Amino acid sequence: MAARNLGSSDPGTTVLDPAQADVTGEGTPGAPAGKRRGRFHTLTVAEVRPLTQDSVEVTFAVPPELHGEYDYDPGQHLALRATIDGRELRRSYSICRPRSVGSVSVAIKRDLGGAFSTWANTELHAGDRLDVMSPQGTFTTALDTLDDTHIVGIAAGSGITPLMSLAHTVLERSTTSRFTLVYTNRTALDVMFLDELADLKDRYPSRLALHHVLSRQTRSSALLSGRIDEEKLRLMLASIIRPAAVDEWFLCGPFELVQLCRDTLESVGVAAEHIRFELFTTGEPTRAGGDTGRPVIVGAGDKTFEIEFTLDGESATVTTPVNAKESILNAALRVRPDVPFACAGGVCGTCRAKLVSGDVTMTENYALEPDEIARGYVLTCQSHPTTDRVVVDYDV
């Protein structure tokens, strides 16, 4: 998985962003998960179930005392933390099941060269213990206004994971709701949750429209064969999906597909506030991320920025050289290793905090929604000070 949702992705914006307050619930299905700052808890792996040749579903058991912490809305995600080959790694994965009490499941697809995803697919087993952050993210919909609502999801590969939870919930919550899913993969063997999708279609035959698109395998319909490009997408919008009859759009997949869908939808008159998206990556996998608290040396006479941050009610200050071009997250990790983060790529939103004082430039933003930006929140993994002193608060 990766990015969150209605926020601008324009690089170089001087921005602000969201915060999360601690919220605990009763763990009851139907109760809103609310926003909270993510906290890690160690959970036991209850099951690792193969989905395809290179993907698995991992289910964690949630003990009674943590039920409230792991309440979630469909479309949210979990950050997982593990030490692999002596290195701490964190990755975010979308929750793939409708809300339940006592368990939470994510799907992990093995990426070429991906250390965490490869480890999870080959080495993770039932009974293992893993650090799991409480659910995060706003890639979801209002669950109390689903009557007569038509939602469309467009997903590629493992982008199906949050849409599985969304589709289940939308169709189950209201007898008048509809869900259309366009799901693209290379071949039929790459389709995750194939049986579950078929079962969902059987359960809601008149309210779920399911369209499998295969890019490297010919189907009986030319519209459902080959890669989704602008021409094919416009044909879909003129035939199987009528934008005027859609209330909300959910896009999840690689940057190129998501951006194509956003641009095309907006060109046919779909308002941006009705389009939510989540990314696998930012499209720049080679960019270095400041996520490890790397050492920074302050030389005599170096011009510096002072960063003050509050976390769990405690304040700390760190100095960073201007020429280091260091993110707030990287600087904060040098004095507080428990500062929250997951992807460190501006995608998951785990590291967000409120900008209390000073100014910053955000390199990327794929996680913050417009109202959060307007209220003054930033992604600390992407935020770089532009004033002598910057103050951020993770607790707001």
Image (tube, grey):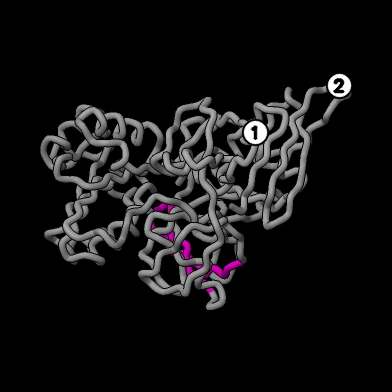
Q: Residue at x 41, y 74 (%)?
A: 28
Left or right: 325, with 212 as reference point: right
In the image, is residue 99 part of the stretch drawn in magenta? no
Segment tinted magenta in the rendering: 42-62
Task: Find numbered disc 2 in the image and state the secondary structure of the residue it sits on.
Answer: loop
For disc 1, the marked residue is: 358
Report the residue that reaches farthest toward the right: 300
Residue type pointed to by label 2: Gly
In the image, is residue 45 part of the stretch drawn in magenta? yes
Q: Position of residue 120 (x, y in %)?
A: 54, 55
Task: Find numbered disc 1 in the image and state the secondary structure of the residue it sits on.
Answer: loop
Tally of numbered tags = 2
For disc 2, the marked residue is: 301
Left or right: 300, with 107 as reference point: right
Question: Distance of mark 1 from mark 2, alpha carbons?
Answer: 22 Å
Q: Residue at x 32, y 50 (%)?
A: 191
Q: Is residue 115 visible?
A: no
Left or right: 151, with 334 as reference point: left
Q: Position of residue 158 (x, y in %)?
A: 39, 48
Q: Position of residue 354 (x, y in %)?
A: 58, 44
